[in-house]
Amino acid sequence: MEKIESREKSTAERRALDTLVGYNLRRASVVMLNDFEVEFAEVPLRPTTFAMLATVDENPGISSADLGRLLGIKSANMAPLIAELANRGLIERRGHAEDKRVQILFLTAEARNAMPKWRQQALRHEERVLLDLTRSERATLLRLLRRVWIGKGG
């Protein structure tokens, strides 16, 4: 009898969780992260490091501080992430011409050459995860998610 009550309570709690946006965002995030890890296993890149490389690719010479602000990465976390990418030969750090305290970032030739493949992998990953959504549903999902994080200063 205890087992049945526990299972019923668990189901009721689950239904309550299913109504929470945060819970559903977290579950969707786990699916996205797990699939991203599989797609990029050979590189290896994580969503954060891919986002950093893609942003530097689009903004050569961006400062590390601006990169962190654009991506919503805390400054305390930027130094180890940049060091990781530099140690892997993917990011080149240079001092700013006018202010040597400022670090500006460029992709290495290796990373620049790999970016088209990595972007295709990212698209393939998203296509696989979002396969059950129509093009219109995907656009709505993206628009709503952006409203949430942009509206909160992200």
Image (spheres, helix red, strand yellow):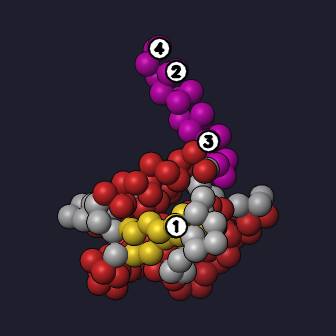
Which numbered marker is on residue 37? none
N-term-proximal mark, 1 vs 2: 2
Q: Is residue 114 above or below residue 64?
A: below
Which numbered marker is on residue 5? 2
- In the rendered image, residue 11 lying in the magenta stretch gets the answer yes
Please state the horizontal and vertical placement of residue 114, each as a whole percent of the image: 29, 80
Q: Does the rendering let one see residue 121? A: no
Helix, strand or loop status at disc 2: helix
Task: Give the residue type that dot 1 points to.
Answer: Gly
Cα distance between the residues tagged 3 and 1 = 49 Å
Cα distance between the residues tagged 3 and 4 = 22 Å
Q: Badge 4: how crowded within 10 Å, few (<14), some, or many (20+)?
A: few
Residue tagged 4: 2
Numbered range of the magenta stretch: 1-25
Q: Quadrant of residue 117?
A: bottom left
Residue placed at 29% from the left, 66% from the top? 89
Cα distance between the residues tagged 3 and 2 = 18 Å
Q: Is residue 111 above or below residue 41?
A: below
Residue tagged 1: 95
